[in-house]
Image (cartoon, rainbow, N blue to C red):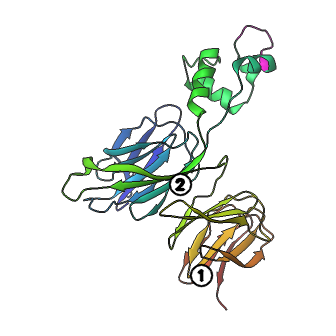
Amino acid sequence: MGDSIILVLDQLANSHIIAVDSKTGKKRWLVERSESHAWSTPVVFQPSGSVEPLVLTASSGQLAGHRISDGQRVFSHLGLPAGIIASPTLAGNTVFAFGYSLSEPPWADKLTQLDKNQDQRLSVDEYGTSSVLVAIAHYLGNRDGIVTEDEWKTWSAHVMGGTHLLAVQVTQPSTSPSEAITSRDVWKHDRGYTSVVPSPLAYDGILYVIKNGGILTAFDMMTGEVVKMGRVPGAIGGYSASPVAAEGKVFLANEDGQVAVLKAAREWEPLAVNDLGEGVYATPALSDGRVYIRTTDALYAFGAR
């Protein structure tokens, strides 16, 4: 932002947000964060009345806003699930974000499965390359490489919770300093978002969410009402790329390389599906009447004939 590069590093230990000079790479500020691991990309957000833009983050159970000038945290909003992959989406002063939580098995089940020497603990030769158990062993408790019952319970409590889409209104009174920013839930949709990667798309009063299987849901952004949900004909594979929109059309690209074009509306309608025959995982980019799509094999630019 401006002449700063801002990075959010949310992880099991030593989470922080940092700004560096874009020309020299020198640190300008660093602020520690209480959040744990997350994968979402932060966005720049300037609530109405705010004197300067913020870095908005969605991570492990909460939204947060940091001032770009000095990194100071000016608001936090609890209520998100523990697992956050998709980035938050903005429409005016409203933030849309979703995530999911996990249900870990009881400790006794893990012991039955892995505890070879029956010492009621799990060592590296027992849990092997399990990413979850490696993380617990090295970042929770005494970090000695051994997973104990207490450490497993701590992890389970950390990842438990719901799976939902949340709409949050962020308000900055024009007569107050940035520390007075407030937030409130507008609506909440409790439906499965487990492992959903694409970020929501806010366009012309409608919020679009695409899931694996080509399941597209259109929400009324003001009320959270589901106005249409259905599968996108001819594009029902897995989805990593986020939907984008322009000129009254929504563009969706799935992992099999099928690119669907829809009429953007409450009752969205499929217009065309083009099969590139190459995997697509990156979100399409729109610029000057062209659609740019990066596949596993090439970069394409498409325009009107």
Which amino acid, by three-letter code, is at mark 2?
A: Ser
Residue 305 colored magenta? no
Q: Quadrant of residue 93?
A: bottom left
Question: Where is residue 47 drawn, in percent x and y?
Answer: 33, 60
> Which residue bears the numbered disc 1?
290
Residue 116 colored magenta? yes
Question: Where is residue 268 drawn, in percent x and y?
Answer: 65, 74
Q: Residues within 10 Å of mark 1 (few under 14, many from 20)?
A: few
Q: Earlier in the sequence, mark 1 or mark 2?
A: 2
Which amino acid, by three-letter code, is at mark 1?
A: Arg
Front-lying residue, 19 or 237: 237
Specify the quadrant that holds the C terminus: bottom right
Q: Residues within 10 Å of mark 2 (few under 14, many from 20)?
A: many
**View extreme (bottom): residue:** 305
Disc number lying in front (1 or 2) = 2
User: Which secondary structure lies at badge 2?
Assistant: loop
Front-lying residue, 81 or 131: 81
Question: Where is residue 262 drawn, in percent x and y?
Answer: 67, 76
Specify the quadrant that holds the N terminus: bottom left
Residue drawn at (59%, 73%) of the image: 266
Front-lying residue, 42 or 219: 219
Residue drawn at (21%, 51%) of the image: 177
Instruction: Give the vertical position of 281 relative to 267 (above or below).
Output: above
Which residue range is magenta in the image?
114-120
Question: Where is residue 166 drawn, in percent x and y?
Answer: 51, 51
Q: Please report contact status of discs 1 and 2: CB closer than 8 Å, yes or no.
A: no
> Which residue bears the numbered disc 2?
87
Q: Is residue 218 left or right of residue 65?
A: right
Q: Is residue 259 left or right of residue 32?
A: right
Q: Is residue 275 at all visible to an observer of this figure?
A: yes
